């Protein structure tokens, strides 16, 4: 039973501490849509999504009203498109069909314009990667991702090279919006199949026909809880975060089960990631500063983030029978007001962010760099982050935006949940010859676990 005190506590968390359910994401398998005719395949995909997700937004809004819990986004993820597009020559009609389906159903985003190329690329994979600049610049709701590495397979450096070039081309195609198209593309190592968060969401081949995945968030709730234990030892800090993560995740579990029931779809997972926003009071960086750091990015930031990430996971797994996705703490530069402040102050650099990704939920997220950054440098950043994921057997990712016409110190405005970001420097020395080698960086020794 939920007692009155718990109900009042939840209402306070929602009203004063920015607690929300960040997304209800319906995962939909498109494997039964496969055919060798581009138009027929696109038509099948559109009708499959429009039918299955017809009531997704309506149900999300009803749950908001019935339970008083804000649900920020309603989203769809689908089978990685490269897996179903092998028999067609051009994946762009699929991209347009996905975007039309998102518009028809009223969701905020649709993810799954994706490829899994950690050990090599098929022709379908290569065509999809080459189409990314056009597909993501011409569509409004479509998001894409590419998994270039796993701990078991190593890193596909040929794919890494192609993606560096695609990211620069995509930035140029959306230059009038500050390279915004790059915010819709994530490059992964060890991607998970049930991630509800964009831009990296896709419905993995190991998933069923349909699933409801929910992502919760609550950086403001965690920070407010830590304000009450100021100066206490780290044991107390960890316990406080665990208890708070438990309460936050219980709300996600409730929303997920109710959404699954009303939509007649299986409940998938609750992703208990702390996902910040540019709103004051909703920052992961401010949680780290509440632990005693003058500014996020200074010495001690990686240790503080490691504690936070671990405590969030420990608290969340006790609150839901199915925790999945990424589940930890995001550190997106443009979407976290504390991160933005730290970068402007010079406390947070690309190298420090890379170090922090060793212990955070994902990786380098929404990083704005100068528009004249060479594709080989972008590729090298992707490779560095993939190496962290492969060696540490964790999910890592990069969402990087070379902003056309901008230089270090400029600020680019993306708007909404994407916020704004200071353009931060990259190293001036070339990685061209390194990236030109191609091939595959082998898996580490500890990949041989069985």
Image: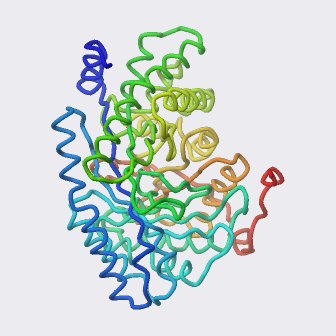
In the rendered image, residue 103, in percent from the top left (x then y), is placed at 22, 66
In the rendered image, residue 212, in percent from the top left (x then y), is placed at 37, 51
In the rendered image, residue 82, in percent from the top left (x then y), is placed at 50, 76
- Residue 133 is left or right of residue 303, and the answer is left
**Res 405 seen here:** no
Q: Quadrant of the N terminus?
A: top left
**Count of all numbered marks drawn on residues in the image:** 0
In the rendered image, residue 111, in percent from the top left (x then y), is placed at 39, 62
Residue at 54% of width from left, 42% of height from top?
Answer: 361
- Residue 386 is left or right of residue 134, and the answer is right
Q: Is residue 336 above or below residue 36?
A: above
Rendered image quadrant of residue 15: top left
Q: Is residue 372 above or below residue 408?
A: below
Q: Is residue 387 above or below residue 78?
A: above
- Residue 23 is left or right of residue 315, and the answer is left
**Res 96 seen here:** yes
Rendered image quadrant of residue 247: top left
């Amino acid at each position: 039973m939920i007692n009155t005190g718990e109900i009042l506590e939840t209402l306070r968390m929602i009203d004063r501490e920015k607690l929300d359910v960040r997304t209800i994401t319906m995962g939909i398998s498109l494997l039964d849509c496969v055919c060798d005719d581009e138009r027929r395949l696109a038509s099948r995909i559109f009708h499959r999504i429009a039918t299955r997700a017809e009531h997704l937004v309506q149900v999300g809004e009803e749950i908001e009203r019935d339970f008083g819990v804000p649900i920020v986004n309603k989203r769809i993820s689908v089978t990685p498109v490269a897996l179903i597009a092998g028999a067609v020559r051009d994946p762009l009609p699929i991209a347009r069909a996905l975007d039309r389906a998102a518009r028809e159903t009223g969701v905020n985003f649709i993810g799954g314009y994706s490829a899994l190329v950690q050990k090599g690329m098929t022709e379908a994979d290569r065509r999809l990667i080459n189409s990314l600049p056009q597909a993501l610049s011409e569509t409004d709701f479509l998001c894409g991702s590419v998994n270039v590495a796993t701990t078991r397979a190593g890193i596909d450096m040929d794919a890494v090279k192609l993606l560096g070039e695609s990211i620069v081309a995509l930035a140029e195609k959306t230059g009038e919006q500050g390279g915004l198209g790059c915010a819709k593309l994530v490059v992964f190592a060890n991607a998970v199949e049930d991630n509800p968060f964009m831009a990296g969401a896709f419905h993995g081949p190991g998933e069923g026909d349909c699933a409801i995945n929910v992502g919760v968030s609550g950086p403001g709730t965690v920070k407010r809880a830590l304000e009450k234990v100021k100066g206490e030892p780290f044991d107390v800090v960890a316990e406080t975060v665990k208890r708070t993560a438990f309460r936050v995740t219980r709300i996600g579990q409730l929303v997920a089960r109710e959404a699954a029931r009303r939509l007649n779809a299986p409940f998938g997972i609750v992703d208990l990631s702390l996902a910040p926003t540019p709103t004051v009071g909703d920052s992961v960086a401010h949680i780290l500063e509440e632990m005693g750091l003058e500014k996020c990015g200074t010495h001690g930031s990686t240790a503080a983030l490691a504690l936070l990430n671990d405590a969030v996971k420990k608290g969340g797994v006790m609150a839901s029978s199915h925790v999945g996705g990424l589940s930890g703490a995001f550190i997106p530069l443009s979407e976290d007001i504390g991160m933005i402040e730290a970068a402007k102050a010079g406390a947070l650099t690309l190298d420090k962010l890379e170090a922090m990704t060793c212990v955070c939920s994902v990786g380098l997220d929404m990083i704005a760099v100068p528009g004249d950054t060479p594709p080989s440098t972008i590729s090298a950043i992707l490779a560095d982050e993939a190496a962290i994921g492969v060696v540490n057997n964790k999910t890592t990712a990069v969402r990087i935006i070379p902003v056309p016409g901008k230089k270090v110190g400029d600020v680019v405005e993306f708007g909404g949940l994407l916020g704004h970001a200071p353009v931060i420097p990259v190293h001036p020395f070339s990685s061209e010859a390194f990236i030109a080698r191609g091939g595959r960086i082998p898996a580490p020794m500890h990949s041989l676990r069985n």
